[in-house]
Image (cartoon, rainbow, N blue to C red):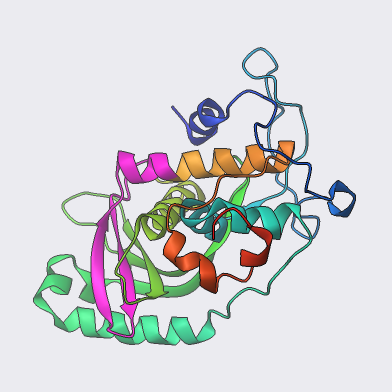
Amino acid sequence: MNNADHLKNQLPTAAHSEVDHSKVDHSKIDHPNSDLPRANLPETDPSKTDLPTVHLPMIPVSDVRQWTFCQRVLWHRRVMPQRTPETPKMALGREAQSALEQLEKRRSGRRYGVHLADRKFDVYLESATLGVRGICDALLFLPPTHGETQRVIPVEVKRTHAGAGAHHIAQLAGYAVLAEEQYQMTPGSIDFGFIVLLPSQRVVRVVLREKARQAFFEAVAGIRTMMLHERFPEPTQYRSFCPDCEYVRFCGDVL
């Protein structure tokens, strides 16, 4: 099953929202992601889903991370007009390079061949098939061994004291899927990646097999459904973070 079929199977059929929209001012709703490039997606087969045939905007991979952590933040950023600027990645890129250099010197890094890798930072990846794009903090290109093709390891940098979460792993899986398509690799061939945790510079190896990829595809399908139907999502399960959220004043049901 290719990526397009996998994603199509995740898309639910159109349904009426069960959320009360009486307090939402729909006059303020602008076109979702109007400032983003459009995805060159194949037309939806009406026999398989009753979603309308539309030209959908490209979804940033970073949105997958946010959707997995709190879906309502994406509602406010992509459907409603409350927007916040993206966090600059330049400083993170420099710290990623430093962390990878430290990993090269460790026994674990040499076990994965990191010391032999060609490193590229801030790599733009895009899938016209899925309608997803993003900039991966780093890709490690390892030389082929024992007759194998070139191996690629995605690396993401996260500034957190809590460790690598499910939302980080879903984002990393997304970069793996996009890299496989962009570099014409066999789907599923990128089976692990690294998450660099700052400020500790701890490097975590993450398995990127079916479970992680499924989380990525489900997140993309969920984001598409929200944007198509303007469906207000349920609140995050991580309620302890809500008081510090810039959108907390719009979520009166969480406090």
> Image check: 167 left or right of 70?
left
Which portion, as a residue range, is magenta? 187-215
Q: Position of residue 45 (x, y in %)?
A: 67, 19
The residue located at (66%, 44%) in the rendering is 232
- Residue 57 makes an appearance in the image: yes
Q: Quadrant of residue 109?
A: bottom left
| Quadrant that contains the C terminus | bottom right
Taking the spot 53% from the left edge, 52% from the top edge, the residue there is 67
Against 95, residue 13 (above or below) is: above
Q: Residue at x 75, y 49 (%)?
A: 38
Q: Is residue 62 above or below residue 84?
A: above
The residue lying at 51 percent from left, 30 percent from top is 10
For this orientation, the residue located farthest to the right is 27
Q: Nearer the viewer, residue 57 or 40?
A: 57
Quadrant, the N terminus: top left
Q: Nearer the viewer, residue 221 or 80?
A: 80
Residue 168 in magenta stretch: no
Question: Going by the image, does 116 lie left or right of 51?
Answer: left
Residue 194 lies within the magenta run: yes
